[in-house]
Image (cartoon, helix red, strand yellow):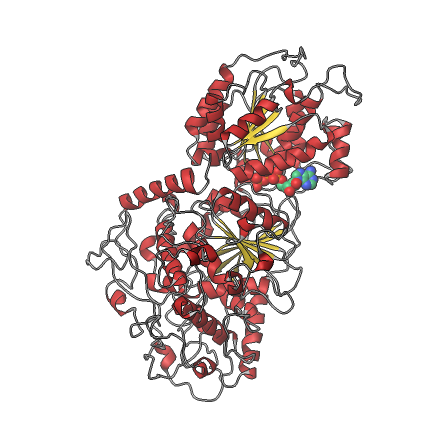
Amino acid sequence: MADDGMLLNFELGDAPLKSQVKFKGGRWRDRLKAQRSAKQSHEESPDSTPPRRRPGATAGDHDAGRPAKRPRTEDGDARGYAKMPRTADAGPKPPSHAMKTGQISSSLFTSNPSAVTDFDQPPAEEAEPAKPSNAPLSEGAENFHSLGISRRVAQHLATKLEMKAPTAIQKNTVPQLIKEDSDAFLQAETGSGKTLAYLLPIVHRIMALSLNEDGTPKDTKVHRNSGLFAIIMAPTRELCKQIAVVLEKVLRCAPWLVCTTVIGGESKKSEKARIRKGVNILIATPGRLADHLDNTKVLNVGTVRWLVLDEGDRMMEMGFEDDIKTIVSKIRADKLEKVNAEGVVLDGVLPSRRVTVLCSATMKMNVQKLGEISLEDAVHIMASKAEMDGDAEAGTEAVFAAPSQLKQACIVVPAKLRLVTLIALLKSTFARKGSVMKAIIFISCADSVDFHYQLLKDTKALEPPTPDSSPTKPDRNPHTDTTVAPAAYVTSPANPKVMLHKLHGSLAQPVRSATLNAFSTCKDPAVLITTDISSRGLDVPAVDLVIEYDPAFAVPDHMHRIGRTARAGRPGKAVLFLMPGSEEGYTSILPASTPIAPQLYESTLQKGLASAVNLPSTHTTSETDKQTWTSRAEALQLHLEQRLLANPAAGAEDENADGDDGGKPGNAKGKGYSNSKPKSWAKPKPRPDNPLLDAARQAFRSHIRAYATHVREERVYFDITQLHLGHLAKAFALRETPGGIGGGVSRRAHHHKAPGGGGGGGGEKKGRASGGGKVSRGHDHDDDGDGVGAVDEDAARRMRDKMRMVMNASSEFNIG
Ligand SMILES: Nc1ncnc2c1ncn2[C@@H]1O[C@H](COP(=O)(O)OP(=O)(O)OP(=O)(O)O)[C@@H](O)[C@H]1O
């Protein structure tokens, strides 16, 4: 540890130092703002402890801005770690004067490791905004009709869907799929319009069965019973539904054609009934499609001309290889019908062979494998000419490039400050109404999503439904009771309503669908806290910001996550949270196409906590407007920790409102307690004493386990042995490191507590003596299981495989 906080205990005298804070690194503007604000807050708040530059602070030494000496208090130790009441029963609330004077501190700004990266850069010229790389092309140069799409469809796109010109990938794909019958591999960056790139030629050619080139009707009328012509496969139900929505919009100009989905989540019987009624384009998840091919006799694939595999790499990752092999071989084995049952000649208008189209934004080994399974002599279609000409270098760049207009930033935040920095970032994001409408926060696992959602929502939302909000009220969707709520903390008088949403694969399907719909259509500013379930293909309009609070498990996942913003030429920002140390190296393996600007966490805190934090309605704060951002950060952390310690039995709050999944494997749910709504009042179930605390502990444990599942090549940056569990506990508003982080990780680690936590404070000492309280490889103290053990490679691999299997195949994606 670079610093144990001792330097801060030197007496610096009463006179203010000339320079209170020396901010280094990041953008010069951020530094300037941070500097000014620190100066201002110092002047405004003579009572507050002035932040002082630590002697010898160097570039990137973020401790430079920490508060200076904290007086030793009766309750605190010399390092500024306050002794906080330990248990819920002990009554956690400090006297209000303590918060006012800042005597009791959550010691957020001490003992933090410094960033190893030197962020000091020369003041950069404000660069020209980058030209969007995934936007529609200029209208004058290109239009859909000139690519070969019928005038009817082109007009419909322009007038009804406001799509006048194609994107680059559409420009290159549409003529190919209209004129040629060869297989194709479509590869283009996120948000570039791949869905319409394959849908439009399919719809155009099916429509051509009943329409002449000039749009006049042919003698032969095709309808829903004329045959199934195309099957589109996507890895998740959400994606299938999204594709269906796009297709339905396009098909409004050809209402005689019908598409439907078979994706599980509803009875197979009703899916069969829809297939029996007749369908021309089927959208399916691989598992469910394989099932129907086996068991649904009316599903005739003799007329199928196109098989589209969207998000191919994801399907492979999710273990659908065998299903896809079976599907491909079954469809290929079925004799191709040149004429349909009604005598309509299909060949010539439709492809004379079965065409497979594979789509992916990223190219992984598994996509190549999928290509081998499904493609024959495929053409590789990309967005730009240079890529398509086979320029290897350009090709590699394009494969992993983020949209050029996407602004990327990275905040290196010490573990202890992660939670308050996240809140500060959200608060500044939503400071002005209308500036940001939607933000997505990616978190590593479902338990952590649940916890953060519970923590960040306004506790008013936990009240049982009133008669007004009864299920009969038309605008209330009971499916979103536990997944959508007003946010606390991040609102401001200027932007008083921000809606919080949570989504992960352990939620029941109707809940998932309703939540996604609520987020997409939300008219108020909205935040979605989610796992990687939302990283692929999801197209939610107006997502302005993506926050990777937990970094992705693999670089391609990162690319997909950040690709949820800056779509179709729109602007967007992505912020990546990293911790000081080995994690910082992660940026070196991210594609260099768009630079990642370092952003100081001090600037983020200072900006976000420039004004008082709006605490949930059931809580009050003694915070005053005179506080500095550092003391606000500490007060906020303290408040969060106290919320966790508050005893719900005493009527403070009941956070136990998210038991909506019934305990699926892989996410440590189903703990025998469930929704706090009246039903559970009537029939009490065994409940933990303190659901929010329990959720935090569970989230922490799952987070650590998830941390071990970063792909092997990237584990050098996400090295579980480097984690400081005590510090990380603070990011879950915990004062002690929860126990029970076993499960494949051998239990040979240290027992240690979060600094400033209960049990006498300074809880690092035990861990520090034998490895700084980190998850250590090779430390073999046996303890009571209250820590994380040594993680050997094998155990980590086994756990990763297991987690992937569980997360992917069953709970996370709920594929039917
Ligand atoms: N020609 C166009 N003009 C305007 N908007 C378009 C056009 N084509 C597609 N879009 C819009 O672009 C957005 C992204 O499209 P789409 O979801 O197909 O992207 P994608 O390439 O499949 O992205 P991802 O790889 O993330 O799945 C959608 O909102 C879509 O409506």
Judging depth in this view, the residue of 170 and 532 nearest the camera is: 532
Judging depth in this view, the residue of 468 and 650 nearest the camera is: 468
Left-right relation of 4 to 50: left
Left-right relation of 623 to 250: left
> Quick check: can you spot residue 358?
no
User: Where does ligand 1 appear, by image quarter?
Assistant: top right
Q: Where is residue 741 in the image (x, y as percent from the top left)?
A: 30, 54
Q: Is 441 placed above or below 338 here?
A: below
Q: Is 308 placed above or below 11 here?
A: above
Q: Is 33 placed above or below 742 here?
A: below
* Residue shown at the point (75%, 20%) measured from the top left: 211
Q: Position of residue 1 (x, y in %)?
A: 33, 66
Left-right relation of 322 to 794: right
Q: Quadrant of residue 673?
A: bottom left
Query: What is the total number of numbered labels drawn onto the structure image?
Result: 0
Judging depth in this view, the residue of 374 and 612 nearest the camera is: 612
* Residue shown at the point (48%, 74%) measured from the top left: 630
Judging depth in this view, the residue of 121 and 304 nearest the camera is: 304
Q: Where is residue 295 in the image (x, y as percent from the top left)?
A: 47, 22
